[in-house]
Amino acid sequence: MDDHQGKATEELTRLNRELSLLNTLSQIINQSVDFDAILNNSLDKITEIAGVPFSGIYVLDEKNQELLFAAYRGFSSDFVKAVRRLKIGEGVTGKAAQLGEAFFIDDYAVSPHAIPIAIEEGLRSLAVIPIKSATKIYGTLNIAWKEPHSISISEKSLFGSIGQILGGAMERASYYGENLRRLEELKTLYAINQEIASRLELKVVLQKIVEKAIGLLGAEAGIVALWDRRRQCYTGAVVHNLPESMIGREFHPTAEGIIGEVITKKTPVVYEDYGEHPNRIRDLDPYRFKEVVGLPLIVRDMLIGTMVVGSSDPRKHFGQSEIDLLFNFANQAAVAIGNTILYEDSLTKIDQLTTLYEIGRTLSSTLDLDDLLRKGMEMIQARFGYASCGILTLDKEKAELRVRQLIGKDAQDLRGRRFRVGVDGIVGWVAQTGEPYYAPDVSKDPHYLSISSETKSEAVFPLKVGDEIIGVLNIESNELRGFGEEDLRILSLFANQLSIAMQNASLFSDLRQTLQHLKEVQEQIVQTEKLRALGEMASGVAHDFNNLLAVILGNIQLLSHQLESLSSQEIRERLKIVERASKDGAETVRRIQEFTGVRRDREYQVLSIHEIIREVVAITQPRWKDQPQKKGIQIDMVTDLQEVPPILGNASEIREVLTNIIFNAVDAMPRGGTLTLSTYLHPEWVEIRVSDTGIGMSEEVKRRIFDPFFTTKGPNSSGLGMSVSYGIVRRHGGEILVESEPGKGTTFLIRFPVGYEKEKKKEPKAVAESKEIRARILVIDDEPFVRDILSKMFGLKGHEVVVASDGEEGIDRFKSGGFDLVFTDLGMPKVSGWEVGKTIKTLSPQTPVIMITGWGTELDPVKLSENGIDRVVTKPFNFEELQQVVLQAMETRRSSPQPSSETQMSRRQL
């Protein structure tokens, strides 16, 4: 009884000890997830509590299918070294791991699975328990004795329980390690992705990707190939530790190497012995690659490229976890590449839009066709760098294209060359079909006409306006498939813009020619109209001149017959009448010059409106008074001129406006009437009103009165008078309006801006006569009467006068020296007045040269200055004014400090 109770107590004690061991072991194991800590702490507790002298734990290496002796207690170092690695199935330990079953061997030496080194170590008994979870074996727990030991059932149970605890702990540690590894991988991928994403240059991004991929697998070399839209295939984009010749190399699904297989399968592909693989790229044989892995780069189900990394290390083997890691990286890399491509595409599109904008701006900057074509070709070549850019224009009648503009190779040789439509080359084909044509490889194109051996690809676009072909745009490249989709799109848009610009330039050229022709015709018509008006006034002018000549001739004849019987006072009165008539004749000539517009002083000046009105009334008198009176028609001229400020304008043009309106008013009063000219002042305008009591105008006539060539007078009128008048008034910043009703007459309102202060006329200051001023004067004129009268006029005032009958004689006389001033005519034989002035100024810059001419204000002031003419006196000249000119010239010369070409008299036209 006592013996039975003692055994029970002993068994209970053992069970408590085992439970304590298992509990303690469980607590220790669960305190850590570190693999090494779990293994070593477990062995320490087993040795301490169970009293086991020799123990160890093997861990399974799944990749190499080996068991590694990871932790041990009590064994010799030689033994540990010998059994560091065991194959699955090798020895008792290998069998236990292979079968997942425990082995308990009391006599190890006789076991069929015993290994000699263990026997040499002195092992006599052995227990091997698999460490496993429900689905996976992690290793084995080995317990040994060096003396015979019968392993009891309780020990087997204990060791089995320890194995289960270790299995659970290693499963947790494995999960933790796996999660930790994945976390580290994610961190690595994230860091890599951040580094890649921070770059926007495609080449830099690709270089980073291939370097990181190589680093993840511990490989040595790699390549990334991308889809090339221009070549329509995959091409090497970047390499690492591979020949540069791989960049740009084309890859197709049927191409050699792993890339072609990845393109076909769109899944990871591994070549474990690349050097012996029949589908390898033999150019890479010198690199002796052993294992190579290729991965697809996919974005939204689209294969944008492939990535390949390889190793030449025979010991290197890419495990599935590494391939999975690289695959995940490849997915991220594909997104980064896709984003970079999108970014570069965006930049490209922006650049293309900028190019189109600049092209549009350039094409719209000129309307000269040759300049337009040259600028267009220069911009295309500068932007895209093509070998040759040309524009050929179509000659429809000859069915030929002519090279109009060409930039690039063979430009000089081909400029002006002609190509037959539909016959010669791609350009001829496009001119016939009217459709764009792209030859990626001209050597294989049936339409290509070989001109340059360097040309590899060609793109031709029709230049069309609507459905009409006006030419072609020809672009050539020295590269095969030298044009991408975007290139062709941009060039097509450019061709459209160019077509429109060419049409606009052509229309502008036609319009400019038409306008030039119209301007010439208009000027002819205007001149004809002026001559017609002048002809209408001719009879009145002749009437005036006949009256003046009658006065002059009559008084001279009376003087010649009654000279001896008339007193000095009567003679003086007769001569004053002749003088007045002569001055009136000169004024009439001046007015005719003003009307015909031959006067040169046409700059805008401060003008008196009242003075202009009085001049116009006087010059048009034959038209509104004399001619109607011959027909028994009475037209009364009324002027109602209120005080108004001066305006700024061209007197001749304003006189032309008023003359046109007065002539129209006279025509509108075939039975006579009243013509009224009045002026009014408004806050911003000086207004001239020209009113008649004539037949008036209809609304249609009023609406078209200022249209060019519109007339109600039939074929004898040009219809330009009022149109020209309208243009003149608008040029002066004014406006012209018309008020009229049928049967109630017409009023024209002409308005000019005000705001100009009256300019004081700067007359040369009169110089008092002085007995001390006596001049030596040279008079040069081919008219004897003029020489004689000038000589006598100057002689009356005590001046010494020397005369010459032409310019050549005058220059010779001047060289004799001693002349204070020179009077010269303009038009003379041999040497003109221009040459006289220039020569005298060369000989004596300080000597004043005065030109006396009947051309008067028709002379150009610039030409006068260039030829050394200081002053102009207009024929007929006035005795007092001539004397004043001499006095002023002498005063100026005497006050000058020294002779200088810059010391000249101020010019004044008389």
Image (cartoon, rainbow, N blue to C red):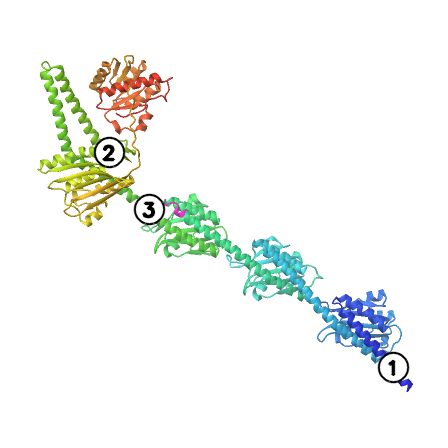
Whole-Å distance between the Cαs marked 1 and 2?
150 Å
Q: Is disc 2 in contact with disc 3, using a CB cutoff of under 8 Å? A: no
Mark 1 — residue?
A: 9
Front tag of 1 and 3: 1
What residue would you read off at disc 3?
Answer: 508
Q: In front: 24, or 144?
A: 24
Q: Using the image, tell me which numbered label, if any, was put on residue 122.
A: none
Mark with earlier residue (1, 3): 1
Q: Residues within 10 Å of mark 1 (few under 14, many from 20)?
A: few
Left/right placement of residue 690 relative to residue 504 reads left
The magenta segment: 362-367
Compared with 716, 760 (above or below) is above
Q: Find residue 597 and name its label.
A: 2
Inspect the image, locate mark 3, and give the three-letter code of the amino acid beneath it: Phe
Q: Which quadrant of the structure image shows residue 246?
A: bottom right
Q: CA distance from mark 1 to mark 3?
A: 124 Å
Left/right of residue 578 with respect to residue 734 in the rendered view:
left
Q: Is residue 85 visible?
A: no
**Residue 1 position in % (x across, y down):** 90, 87
Dot 2 falls on a residue whose secondary structure is loop
N-terminal-most mark, 1 or 2: 1
Q: Can you give x and y, in whole percent of width and height, for residue 166 in the image?
A: 77, 72
